Image (cartoon, rainbow, N blue to C red):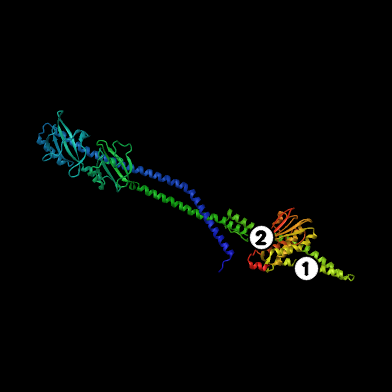
Amino acid sequence: MAISEEGRSKGQLSLTMSLRIRHIAVRFALILALAAALPLAAFGVVSILSLQRGTKESVVVGNRNVATRAAEEIRRYVSANAEILKSLAATLTDTGLRTAQREQILENYIIDLREFREITLFDEAGRVVTSSRIGSPRVSVPKADSLISVGGVGMSPIHLDDDGLPTALFTIHLTRLNQPDGWLVGEFSLEEMWRMVDEVRIGDHGYALVVAPDGTLVAHGDPDKKALVAQALNMAGHHPLVTAEPLSDPLAEYVDDSGLQQLAVSNRINELNWTVIVEQPTSEAYARAMALQRQLIVAVVVALLVMVGVGLLFGRQFIAPIFKLQQATQSVAAGNLETRVEIGTEDEFGQLGDAFNTMANRLVELQENVKRQERQAMFGRVVGGLFHDLMHPIQNIGNNARLMIRPDLDAEAQQSAHHVIERELGILKRFMDDVLNIAKPKPLQRFAMDVNSSVSEIVDAMRGQGESAGILVEGHFASEPLVIEGDRFSLGRVYRNLIKNAIQATAAGGRVVVTTSRVGDHAEISVADTGSGIAPDRLSKIFDDFVTTKSRGLGLGLAISKQTVEQHGGTITVQSEVGRGTSFTLRFPTRDDLSTQAAAS
């Protein structure tokens, strides 16, 4: 089924209005969401920053506590065994003990204390006095400058024994009766310290490690990194918390050798000058904070989406009455005064819709009044024009008809009266033809014709009328043929009407100049006079029906002329200046093919 142009236009208008409603509703929702998003986003940012800062502080404090406890346990462990060795030293300095008794005491200590693998007593010169070890002792008196003091007991740097376990030497300088009495050296196993470090766990992937004063790694809780202890790796170049000087804030986030981001805190064991470091991957340390952060972001996004959805819903409901009114206004502006709106609410929009409907009803009434007044005015103009154009010929016909019935009228006078009646009847017939042609234009019969010859015939025919009025009618024609396709008779009436109007508008002594020329692929005919001209406010209406600048007539001449020109595919324009004259210009497309020119000739 074919869709009418009106239906298509209405459909396009409906689609356009729907798109506009949707676009404005989206903007309304976005504005509403933005208004809510600013404080919500600010709250979200502040909350996330606060959460990150609080979580980091909490994690750091917790890890520091773990490092502190681990350092304290290691200190106590080492100090307790140092005290044991001091107690043994006090026993051995008893003056009543023989060498065999001292050896028995050492063997008993080795049996009771697993941390000591060997305890050997040396004299002041460094010679073995007695030892818990059967055979030659493995230990010797270490150099004093390599020892650190642990509660008055010298402790050597940690080293790995043949089994790959950490050991250190405890050394006590013995005195008897305030005189030097040799050295007591114990080989102290730190295997228990390794187990203590292994038990320090934070989460699933957080471990502790112990670093010696020179930066050597002596223990590590990560099973995958225990080989680094066997390698005696110096951590000074591998960890930011291993430095020669104590740090003011022993806290760091760094990327380890395996590429993991680590959070590390340290605690120094001042008595031993060891450093206990507890580190944990940041992904695990801040996992809860990241989860809460994601939940907060999701909550903010969901809140914004809900706000946008609510804005879209209420935006469409809020804006829909406005677009109903706009659509109705455009419909009324297009001439459909029967348009009405139904808002369906009792708020300001409903009142505005009622006001619009009242306005539309009033416009209908005003339109009917205007139409009625226009009909009356048009009827008056038509009646006036008919009266002026018909009264004179009818009076002439009546007067001459009465003359013809007079018995005393001679044959010549009767012939003259008959001629007047025939002339006036011809005028009436032409007038009726003009009126009929306005209502129902006659079809044209087009033939090839030369503009120069057709215009020159009319100019020659109108010269006599111009001379009677004291006006010179001139013709200037193109040197080349101007061939168009047209109805010679109907175009002749147009030329004649324009020249006649020019003569009537020009005072005696003036001129009417008719010119033909070629302008591109068009033939141009100009009729110019030196008359009174036409006022600008009337110039735009002179081609309308029943509009005339004369004191009498219906004003059909120029309307018929314009209609005829346009039927030929041409145009007619006018230029005028009051007091200097008027110029009408006609343009028609030319036919330059030889067959058409031959037909015209």
Q: On the image, numbered disc 2 is attached to which residue?
A: 518
Q: Earlier in the sequence, mark 2 or mark 1?
A: 1
Q: Is residue 419 above or below residue 517?
A: below
* Nearest the eye: 481 or 570: 481
- The disc label shown at residue 238, or none: none
Q: On the image, numbered disc 1 is attached to which residue?
A: 426
> Where is the N terminus found, in terms of image quarters?
bottom right
Give residue 72's position: percent from left, percent from top. 26, 39
Give residue 35's position: percent from left, percent from top. 49, 48
Give residue 449's position: percent from left, percent from top. 68, 66
* Res 239 visible: yes
* Nearest the eye: 551 or 337: 551
Comparing labels 2 and 1, the label whose residue is closer to the camera: 2
Q: Secondary structure at mark 1?
A: helix
Q: In screen coordinates, is 15 left or right of 165?
A: right
Q: Is residue 90 above or below residue 51?
A: above
How packed is label 2: few (under 14 Cα within 10 Å), some, or many (20 or more)? some
How packed is label 1: few (under 14 Cα within 10 Å), some, or many (20 or more)? few
* Nearest the eye: 527 or 330: 527
Q: Are marks 2 and 1 in contact (CB under 8 Å)?
A: no
Between the C-alphas of marks 2 and 1, the distance is: 37 Å
Q: Is residue 65 above or below residue 535?
A: above
When asked about the image quadrant of residue 146, the answer is top left
* Nearest the eye: 426 or 583: 583
Farthest residue, direction front: 479
Counting every numbered tag in the picture gives 2
* Res 556 visible: no
Give residue 129's position: percent from left, percent from top. 11, 35
Q: Secondary structure at mark 2?
A: strand
Which amino acid type is marked by label 1? Gly
Which amino acid type is marked by label 2? Arg
